[in-house]
Image: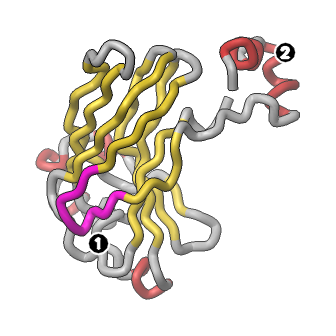
Amino acid sequence: MNPLTYSLCQKPVLGVLMFASSLCVFPPLFQDEPLPLQRTASFVKGFEAPVSRSYFLELGFDFPSTASIRDDQVAGSRYDDNCERDYAAIPQSQRTDLGRPIPLHVLVRDTRSGTVALDKVFNSLCITSTATSGLQKTRTVGRLDLAAGKYTIEVDNVTPQTGLDGVKTTVSLVAGHGK
C-alpha cells in the first residue's frame, strides 16, 4: 500500500467503497517469522513502513494437535479486561485461562540514521484471536507507532517458556485487521 492509497482509504465515502472492494488491504510488514519461545532467542529483520501509523507486533502459536492446544497453559484461551493490567495486580482467581505473561524486548532502529525509534520490553498476555482451523492462536505483543521509513527490528525472547513442546511460535508485524 502506498501513501496515496492509504489516504484515500481514510475518506468517509470513498474509503468505504475502497475497503469493500479490498483496495484498502494492508499487507503485513512481515509475517510468521520464526521466534522459538521455548528458549532464549532473537529475531532480527529489516522492513519498510510505507505510511506513518500504528503497527502491531503479534505472536503466533501453531499447535501440533487438538490435545496440545487444549492443554495449553502458555498462550491462554481468553481475553478480558484483566489482559490490559499488570499480571501481578490480577487476583489469582481471575488468572485462569489468561495464559502466562511473555516478556519480549523490542528494539526498532531507523535504518538510514541508526536512531532508536523504540526500545521497550512488552509483557504479552492473553490471546487476541484463534484460527478457524482450531490449532492456531495469536497474541498481540504491543503497538509500535512508526513514521514512514525503513527500519530494523530486533525481538528478544527474555524468558524461555516451558510447556510449548512441538508448538511453532512466530512473530509478525501487521497494520491491524480493519480499515
Whether residue 15 sits left or right of residue 173 in the image: it is: right
**Quadrant of image for the C terminus:** top right
Q: Amino acid at mark 2?
A: Val
Q: Amino acid at mark 1?
A: Gln
Whether residue 40 sits left or right of residue 81 in the image: it is: left
Query: Which structural element holds mark 2?
Result: helix
Identify which residue, 86 or 120, lies in the foreground.
120
Residue drawn 84% across and 25% down?
Answer: 18
What secondary structure is the stretch in magenta mostly built from? loop
Cα distance between the residues tagged 2 and 1: 45 Å
x, y percentage for residue 170?
A: 42, 58
x, y percentage for residue 152?
A: 37, 31
Q: Which residue is mark 1?
A: 73
On screen, residue 139 above or below 55:
below
On screen, residue 30 above or below 67:
above
Q: Residue furthest left?
A: 88
Residue drawn 47% across and 33% down?
Answer: 47
Q: Which residue is mark 2?
A: 13
Query: Which structural element holds mark 1?
Result: loop
x, y percentage for residue 70?
A: 42, 80
Residue drawn 35% across and 63% down?
Answer: 75
Other residues around mark 2 within 10 Å, as few (<14) / some (14–19) / many (≥20) = few
Identify which residue, 79 or 28, lies in the foreground.
28
**Quadrant of image for the N terminus:** top right
Residue drawn 45% across and 54% down?
Answer: 33
x, y percentage for residue 140?
A: 41, 45
On screen, residue 106 above or below 71:
above
Q: Quadrant of residue 85?
A: top left
Q: Which residues are magenta?
A: 35-42
Q: Earlier in the sequence, mark 2 or mark 1?
A: 2
Other residues around mark 1 within 10 Å, as few (<14) / some (14–19) / many (≥20) = some
On screen, residue 135 above or below 90:
below
